[in-house]
Image (spheres, rainbow, N blue to C red):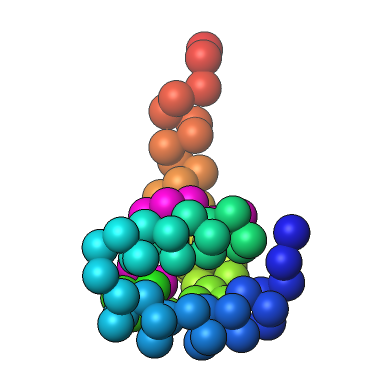
Amino acid sequence: MMSLKSKRELLEVVQPRYLKANKAEKQKIFDEFTSATGNHRKHAIRALKNQVQVQNHPKMRFCRLREKSTREVRRTFRTPSFPNILQRLAPT
């Protein structure tokens, strides 16, 4: 397993060769790249064709969405009509 930094360095070296190569050479370069990095074939194709940039995705977005939805739920339950709803739904 290669580190992300090593994968980027390898991509910088292999990509110019891949873009200039003919179809037979591209297949060989592609096979070598996928076996060295362990990437899926589709990701390797996109990376070698420069259609995707290898980057770290921040995880904060999901956390912020979760916090926002939690705040909305809490706000909903704080409404004055909520206790009345509970009294109406309680079995008698």
Q: Quadrant of residue 46?
A: bottom left
Q: Position of residue 1 (x, y in %)?
A: 74, 59
Q: Picture coordinates of residue 18 (x, y %)?
A: 37, 76
Q: In this orientation, does residue 60 appear?
A: no
Q: Which residues are magenta?
A: 38-47
Residue 24 in view: yes
Verify whether residue 55 appears in magenta. Answer: no
**Which is nearer the eye, 70 or 48?**
48
Towards the viewer: 48 or 16: 16
Residue 56 relative to residue 89: left or right = right
Q: Quadrant of residue 48?
A: bottom left
Work out which residue is located at the far top of the displayed protein and give it: 92
The answer to whether residue 8 is above or below residue 44 is: below
- The image position of residue 21, as x and y in percent, is 30, 75
Using the image as rendered, state which of residue 5 and residue 86 is in the foreground. 5
Residue positioned 59% across, 54% down in the render: 35
* Most frequent secondary structure within the magenta stretch: helix
Residue at x-position 49% and y-position 31%: 87
Q: How many marks?
A: 0
At horizontal 53% and vertical 86% (from top left) the residue drawn is: 13
Q: Is 29 in front, or is 91? A: 29
Residue at the image position 42 percent from the left and 52 percent from the top: 41
Q: Position of residue 31 (x, y in %)?
A: 48, 55
